[in-house]
Image: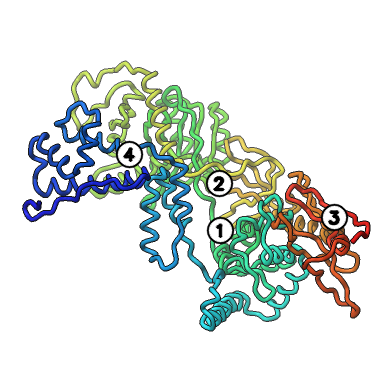
Amino acid sequence: MAEGGLKPPASFVNSTDNPSETSRSWKAWLEQYDFYMIATEKTKKDGEIQVATLLTLLGAQGQEIFRTLNIADRKDIAEVKKAFTEHFNPQVKTVFERFKFHSRVQKQGEPFESFVTALRDLITTCEFHADEKDKALVDRIVAADTLSRAFLPSYGAEANKLEALDHDQIDSITTGIITQPLFKEKLSRATKLDPTMQILASYIKHGWPMTKHACLEPLKPYWNVKSDLTMHNDLLLCRAQIVIPIAMRKTVLDQIHAGHMGVSKCTERAKGAVYWPGYLGQIRDLIESCSVCQEYMRSNSQYSLEPYDIPEYPMQSVSMDIFHLDGNDYLVTVDRYSKWPACYQLKTSRSLEVIELLKRQFIDFGRPETLVSDNASYFTSYEFKCFIEDNDVKHITSSPYHSRSNGLAERMNQTIKNSLRKALISGQTLCDVLATLRSTPLGDQLPSPAVLLQARNLRGQLHCLPHQLKPQGLHLGEIHSRFVKRQSQAIFQNNTATLPTEYCAGMEVWCKLGHRKWAEGVIVEHAETPRSYYIKLLDGKVFRRNIKSLRPNRSSHAYNKTSINNHIDKQQRLVESTNSDRTLINDNLDKQQKLVESTNSDITLVPVQSAQQSQLAVVPNSVDQSGTATPASTGATNPNQMSSSFSSVVTRSGRVSKPPTRLGFS
């Protein structure tokens, strides 16, 4: 009886012996029951009342099942529903359920929506993973495309009209790709003369072998796209792409690379026009071997840096650089351990002034073991070199066009330059900027540069407690571990790409000389610093470059043949072997497929009318009285004719099966 205008669900009746159907029916009924209980607000009542309501709605069959169930608390609605669910949900046989799912096909006249709904209902008991469900559903739905229209004979004249429209559409595809009739004729002739294309055409017409290993060796690369291959007007198509024979591939590659576009542009052009196995990789190799493209290539992408070793004590290693601001040059030095900054305004552009400033710093803090700088004229002059040698200091310079090698000085340049520009506007000086930087903690629980260098805080405008101005005991091991952690985090966050190709002496490379300007050269030797090499150009000049400014020269004579020529030459050798010996052997896979020599004409492949429908028999062509070769008949023949017509059959295992020798008995 309806309560509050709501009709309760009908009694549950299990009328099937199929466990899966029973399980689905119970879940649907239980869902209706839950909705009814919520709508009538009976979920707020006592559990005993809810159980009684459930049994009443279930009917006599449900009440009979309830008496046989082993339930600890028969007044707990959750326990009761759980017991019923376990009763109606026996162990599902996954193999059987998946068989039913894969056997379900769309019936004649069945709406597509109903078919999809049935598939979704069946897949619930197949126990597919979440990422497998969508793929399984898509595999059960077959949609025809432009090149796979097969009409039923019952359509009559209308089907013929539609088929003619499909042929017109395919003609428009080939016409849109090949706009030059002369090139189309040349391509068609090359397809006819290519044995691989002819065997492929025979596979398309008469069917493919059962397995990939049973295919002839040149046709194995086409196995994955065999369902997309068609033939139209002596041209082979892969979807909307024309299959290019071996003899035309070099010409087509040059046409794709016309205009010297990059890899992405050339790849997109090729995807809409041509196809052959491995054509995308050959396009990439072609561009990498193009000397014009490489000469004007943009810079390499960024990659992770190799970190410096953390110094063991203050002023052990010092980085320095020069920046320009408001018409003045400034020398910046920074301790790689304490990050103590120093900045001096230069009055001249000579190395002697830089030397005098460094002497003053060496007197205050001691001489460092290493100095790191770029290749500015201040730091590469003869005077500076003599100064470094006299003070027993090792001078390390970063590679040209790679300022990231001296990143600490570059970052301190940016900090002081920005702070000084704003300080000058507000009436402050360079000394105020340096005092603030030296008293500011580094972060990550690391103290200020003043504490790391002098073991005490500096007294400044920002007041601090008196004991903080006294020398402090530093835990060097803890500070070193924090530096290591900080460096590791920076490496992880700035890890942009993997390292490029390993380089070695004698390797031919492209060397960056400027913005989008590269030149060919040879690596002479490894430089003193990591990832740096000395490069000798063709004109004899020697440059030092980081690997970021180098690129392997794939167009040089060091590479005897590019992968494009290697692949095409390999295919041509295979074709020549087919023409001369009529034999294709797959030694690596131990699968031999032999073609019997024909006496006066090319071979013709026809399907074998035997239990192994997937294999191809090699039948010599017959010659009529006019001298024109005609294909051998594939119809039924008598035993004697069979012995002469079918010379051999290649089985799936690679064995050559010969016909029996007849003695002439009828």
Query: Which of the two discs, 2 and 3, sits closer to the camera?
Result: 3
Q: Earlier in the sequence, mark 1 or mark 2?
A: 1
Looking at the rendered structure, the kind of residue marked 3 is Pro
Q: Earlier in the sequence, mark 4 or mark 3?
A: 4
Which of the 4 quarters of the picture holds residue 601?
A: bottom right
In whole angstroms, how far apart are the C-alphas of marks 4 and 2? 64 Å
Quadrant location of the C terminus?
bottom right
User: In this view of the protein, can residue 557 be seen by the observer?
Assistant: yes
In whole angstroms, how far apart are the C-alphas of marks 2 and 3? 66 Å
Residue shown at the point (39%, 59%) measured from the top left: 116
In whole angstroms, how far apart are the C-alphas of marks 1 and 4? 69 Å
Query: Which of the two discs, 3 and 1, sits closer to the camera?
Result: 3
Q: Which residue is mark 4?
A: 89
* Residue 516, numbered circle: 1
* Residue 659, numbered circle: 3
Q: Which residue is mark 2?
A: 548
In whole angstroms, how far apart are the C-alphas of marks 3 and 1? 68 Å
Name the residue nearer the viewer: 338 or 232: 232
How would you rate the neighbour count of disc 1 (Cα within 10 Å): few for under 14, some for 14-19, many for 20 or more? few
Name the residue nearer the viewer: 608 or 618: 608
Looking at the image, the residue that sits furthest to the left is 4
Circles 4, 3 touching at the beta carbon (< 8 Å) = no
245 to the left or right of 599: left
Looking at the image, the residue that sits furthest to the right is 663
The local secondary structure at tag 1 comes to: loop
Looking at the rendered structure, the kind of residue marked 2 is Lys
Circles 1, 2 touching at the beta carbon (< 8 Å) = no
Query: Which of the two discs, 4 and 2, sits closer to the camera?
Result: 4
